[in-house]
Every structure is written in structure tokens, then in C-alpha cells.
């Protein structure tokens, strides 16, 4: 019996996640064409996003931000038709999500809002989790393609709903890491070995997957980017902008965004957002802990680059201003 021919898939955006999803799809037997702004030595790399849309009906987009998303949609718009399904995996604002959906629907094509959670390693192993906003019948049409790169597909409602869910999840994740950095500083000032917090949290109701994965990295001072400071800051800024004029305030998110902005100003923007620990002068240590820090599989839906900062560098204390904005004194980590 001859196996059915698999649908062609186009990947637009070849950062940390997009490139790995493309590789997973190829291994699963899908014909894959790709494009990104920066040329890459990838199989079937085409000269433009439009040519990718001409070669494939299912288009998965992994671009930097809302501006890039709308640029790509406008570039492929002339060749979109009713057979196309455009799936945006980038974390962008709700307004940009709805505008992209409108532009796609004007051409008779279908659109899904599908941000994800999962790291570079999860992407490489086909174990992302997709939050999806859109018509259920459209989701079913692309389910087999999404299954290839994921361990779960979670419908969230209409287009735009998944965007809000992803932003909400990142608000929680970022706040957890900021307060974890502060908690380690408290122990340090109290003369308590930092490893004691890891021991305590393993038996504490407040423990979480994020803390379990990030705490060892913070103790080790290992801040190679799984999800960069600059990308987490972008997502929190989107969340804050999304509630403007809606009669609510997000003080914890505002404070965490301030700490992330301080990290960017300090030159840590390309590092993992666990480098918020660098706001304090304590030095992480694994001397009393066996094993090595795990790879962290939390959200990394952007093309952040691996840090060039040395995990072993230490500097003078960094003075923190309001909401984490920094005024650097003496020699700081760089």
C-alpha cells in the first residue's frame, strides 16, 4: 500500500524554534520550504516569504514581533487563497493578531493564533505545547502537522484568545523568576547557603516547574539563553499595553518589566531571563550539589541568541532603582 503524500509546509522565520520545527517536520516526512530575513544554510531555502506561500498551503510563522508578522502577511497576501492556512506562532499583541487574521481572511484563507510553550530542546524533540485560537474545523485541518512538533494542542477559543493566554502565562513565569532572585538575595544577606532554598522548595507548595528548572541555573550562574531577557521584556510590555484603557493595573508585571529593563540596560538582554539574579551581588554555587544544571524547557517562541557572557564572571554590587532599573556602580557583570 502506497503511503499518502503529506501536505507541503512552509516555515517563515528560522530562529531557535522555527529552524527546529522545520527539522522535525522533515524527519516526519513532510515536504518543507523555508525563508527568513537572514539567509540560512537550510534545505529548500527560498528567496522570499511569498515564494514559500506559493509552494505550501500550510504556513507556520515564527517571526520576531507584531511588526514583522504584519510585514510577512502583507508580503504573502497576493498569493493567498482558500487553500491556505496561516498559523502565527509568534507572541504579538492582541490587536496585531486580529489585524493579521483580518488580512488573511480578506484573501479567503484561514488563520490560527497559535503561540506555544517549550524551549529549544522541546522544539527539537517535537514536544512543544501549542495554545490555539481559531475555528475548530481549521485546527483539525492542520492537526497532523502540528502534532509532529508538539506533545499537546490546546484550543483556547476564537482568534486572539491564545494570545491572551500566552501573555498571562509569561506574566506568571517572569514574576516567579524575579521573586526567586529576590529570595536568594534574602538568604545571602542572612548568611544562609543558597542551596538551602532549593532543598526547602522541593517540599513547598509554592514550588513550580519554572522554579525547579531555573533555580539550579541561577545557583550555577549559568545564563545561556533558553528564553532571553529582551524577549521576556517584550512579552510583558505587550501585556501591559494590552490593558491600557481597560480600567485595571498590573503592578507585579510592571515591577518585573522594570527589572527586565534594568537587565537590558546592564547589557544582559541576550542572556536567559534567569539572569535577573545578576541584579544582586550574591554568587551562585553548586559546590554542595551533585549533578549539573538541567536544560530549561520553558517558553522560548523567539530567535534569542546564546549569551557570550561567562557564567563564572562576578562583579561589584549593582545598585537597583525603582522597579529594578539599574544604576551600575563599579565593575558589574559583562
Image (tube, rainbow, N blue to C red):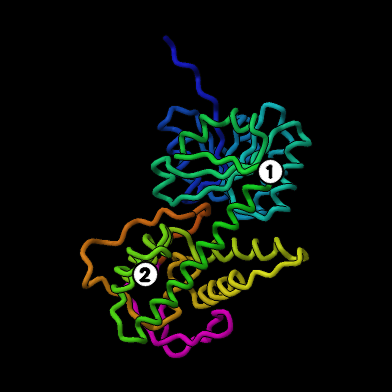
The chief SS type of the magenta part is loop
Residue at x 66%, y 49% (from the top left corner):
69
- In the rendered image, residue 103, in percent from the top left (x then y), is placed at 76, 41
Residue count near mark 1 (Cα–Cα under 10 Å), binned few <14, some 14–19, many ≥20: some
User: Relative to the observer, which residue lies in front, 263 or 287?
Assistant: 287
Task: Give residue 185's position: percent from left, percent from top.
Answer: 40, 81
Q: Which residue is mark 1?
A: 159
Residue at (53% x, 72% y) in the render:
260
Query: Which range of residues does the magenta coloring cover?
Result: 308-334
In the displayed structure image, the side of residue 229 where residue 164 appears, left or right: right
Residue 30 in magenta stretch:
no
Residue at (59% x, 69% y) in the render: 253
The vertical placement of 209 against 187, above or below, is above
**Secondary element at image label 1:** loop
Tell me the SS state at disc 2: helix
Is 331 included in the stretch rendered in magenta? yes
User: Which image quarter: residue 194?
Assistant: bottom left
Q: Residue at x 29, y 68 (%)?
A: 199
Q: Quadrant of the C terminus?
A: bottom left
Query: In the shown orientation, is residue 300 left or right of residue 217?
Result: right
User: In the rendered view, does 258 fall on the left or right side of 73?
Assistant: left
Residue that extends furthest to the bottom in the rendered view of this protein: 330
Q: Which residue is mark 2?
A: 218
Amino acid at each position: 500500500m502506497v503511503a499518502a503524500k503529506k501536505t507541503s509546509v512552509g516555515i517563515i522565520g528560522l530562529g531557535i524554534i522555527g529552524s527546529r520545527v522545520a527539522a522535525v517536520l522533515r524527519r516526519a516526512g513532510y515536504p518543507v520550504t523555508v525563508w527568513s530575513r537572514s539567509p540560512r544554510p537550510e534545505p529548500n531555502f527560498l528567496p522570499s516569504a511569498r515564494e514559500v506561500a506559493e509552494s505550501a498551503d500550510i504556513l507556520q510563522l515564527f517571526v520576531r514581533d507584531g511588526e514583522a508578522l504584519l510585514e510577512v502577511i502583507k508580503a504573502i497576501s497576493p498569493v493567498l487563497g482558500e487553500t491556505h492556512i496561516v498559523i502565527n506562532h509568534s507572541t504579538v499583541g492582541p490587536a496585531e493578531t486580529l489585524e493579521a487574521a483580518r488580512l488573511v481572511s480578506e484573501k479567503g484563507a484561514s488563520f490560527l493564533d497559535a503561540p506555544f510553550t517549550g524551549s529549544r530542546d522541546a522544539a527539537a524533540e517535537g514536544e512543544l505545547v501549542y495554545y490555539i485560537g481559531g475555528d475548530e474545523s481549521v485546527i483539525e485541518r492542520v492537526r497532523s502537522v502540528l502534532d509532529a512538533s508538539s506533545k499537546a494542542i490546546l484550543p483556547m477559543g476564537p482568534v486572539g484568545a491564545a494570545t491572551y493566554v500566552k501573555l498571562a502565562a509569561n506574566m506568571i513565569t517572569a514574576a516567579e523568576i524575579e521573586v526567586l532572585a529576590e529570595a536568594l538575595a534574602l538568604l545571602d544577606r542572612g548568611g544562609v547557603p543558597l542551596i538551602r532554598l532549593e532543598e526547602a522548595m522541593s517540599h513547598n507548595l509554592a514550588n513550580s516547574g519554572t522554579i525547579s528548572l531555573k533555580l539550579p541555573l541561577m545557583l550555577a550562574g549559568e545564563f545561556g539563553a533558553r528564553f532571553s531577557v529582551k524577549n521576556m521584556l517584550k512579552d510583558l510590555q505587550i501585556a501591559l499595553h494590552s490593558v491600557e484603557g481597560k480600567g485595571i493595573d498590573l503592578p507585579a508585571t510592571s515591577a518585573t518589566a522594570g527589572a527586565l529593563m534594568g537587565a537590558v540596560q546592564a547589557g544582559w538582554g541576550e542572556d536567559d531571563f534567569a539572569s535577573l539574579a545578576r541584579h544582586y551581588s550574591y554568587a551562585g554555587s553548586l559546590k554542595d550539589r551533585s549533578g549539573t544544571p538541567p536544560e530549561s524547557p520553558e517558553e522560548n517562541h523567539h530567535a534569542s541568541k546564546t549569551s557570550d557572557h561567562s557564567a563564572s564572571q562576578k562583579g561589584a554590587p549593582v545598585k537597583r532603582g525603582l522597579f529594578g532599573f539599574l544604576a551600575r556602580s563599579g565593575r558589574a557583570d559583562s
